């Protein structure tokens, strides 16, 4: 299994017989100058699942819908919010409401909630569980709003986290926002996540170009026996058995 950071909240996970691409926004370059998605991924023979958590422009690029002209064995699984937003049409994808499940010979996908638009995805393959948060996070904005309002935002997040905890008590891999725009407590949601749900591997999202700040979560993750995978550039890959 190989995991590649494309950009922002977009990750690519490659398995032996298929790949999953999450929340594509912009492509990333490979060492040989080609592009990860448009030149490499779309030319692979294996099946491809394209997942999208919501319609915000930094999580959904309508370009992805044209890929089916280049690749026959591609399957789109979207949050229903994309259809409701008018950004996509009925036949463009399989749409999941919160707590709905998609299952086939390779994987199981269950939609969970968000504290922003759309949802998040829990995935199981080969007895391993994965989670892509989309925009699910503790968006407390505690340095910009009053205490009561910040606590209400936090409570919404904790409620969604409890629903996920009812599904699983251990994740192999979590992809989760670590966004410095939240101020000094920008890692609070990520810490609440790994403290509530045992997580083996953690990858950050939604941090822009602030690699150093995102990588500060490494020390916190270690307190919960979670391996943080530090990032330094777009197109960075990690390989696991």
Image: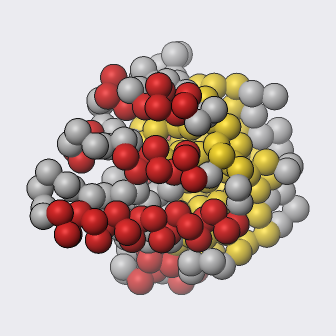
Q: Looking at the image, is 7 positioned above or below residue 96? A: above
Q: Looking at the image, is 237 positioned above or below residue 129? A: above
Identity of the residue drawn at 14% across and 51% down: 143
Q: Nearer the viewer, residue 145 or 107?
A: 145
Residue 60 in view of the camera: no
Residue 223 in view of the camera: yes
Identity of the residue drawn at 73% across and 72% down: 102
Q: Quadrant of residue 111?
A: bottom right
Q: Nearer the viewer, residue 120 or 12?
A: 120
Q: How many marks?
A: 0
Residue 112 in percent (x, y) is at 57, 70
Q: Is residue 224 left or right of residue 86?
A: right
Locate the C terminus and report the quarter of the image it occupies: top right
Q: Nearer the viewer, residue 77 or 89?
A: 77
Q: Quadrant of residue 183?
A: top left
Identity of the residue drawn at 41% across and 83% down: 84
């Amino acid at each position: 299994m190989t995991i590649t950071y494309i950009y922002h909240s977009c990750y690519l996970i490659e398995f032996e017989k298929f790949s999953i691409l999450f929340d594509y926004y912009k492509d990333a370059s490979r060492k040989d100058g080609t592009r990860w998605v448009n030149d490499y991924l779309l030319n692979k023979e294996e099946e491809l699942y394209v997942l999208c958590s919501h319609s915000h422009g930094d999580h959904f690029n309508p370009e992805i819908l044209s890929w089916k002209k280049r690749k026959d064995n591609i399957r789109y699984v979207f949050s229903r919010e994309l259809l409701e937003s008018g950004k996509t049409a009925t036949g463009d994808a399989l749409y999941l409401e919160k707590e709905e499940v998609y299952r086939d010979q390779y994987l199981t996908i269950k939609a969970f909630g968000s504290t922003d638009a759309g949802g998040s995805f829990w995935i199981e393959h080969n007895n391993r569980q994965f989670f892509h948060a989309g925009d699910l996070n503790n968006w407390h904005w505690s340095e910009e709003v009053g205490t009561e309002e910040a606590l209400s935002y936090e409570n919404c997040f904790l409620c969604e986290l409890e629903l996920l905890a009812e599904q699983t008590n251990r994740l192999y891999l979590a992809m989760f926002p670590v966004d410095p725009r939240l101020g000094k407590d920008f890692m609070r949601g990520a810490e609440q996540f790994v403290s509530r749900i045992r997580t083996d591997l953690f990858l950050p999202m939604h941090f822009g170009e602030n690699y150093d700040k995102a990588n500060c979560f490494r020390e916190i993750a270690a307190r919960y026996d979670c391996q943080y995978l530090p990032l330094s550039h777009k197109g960075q890959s990690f390989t696991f058995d």
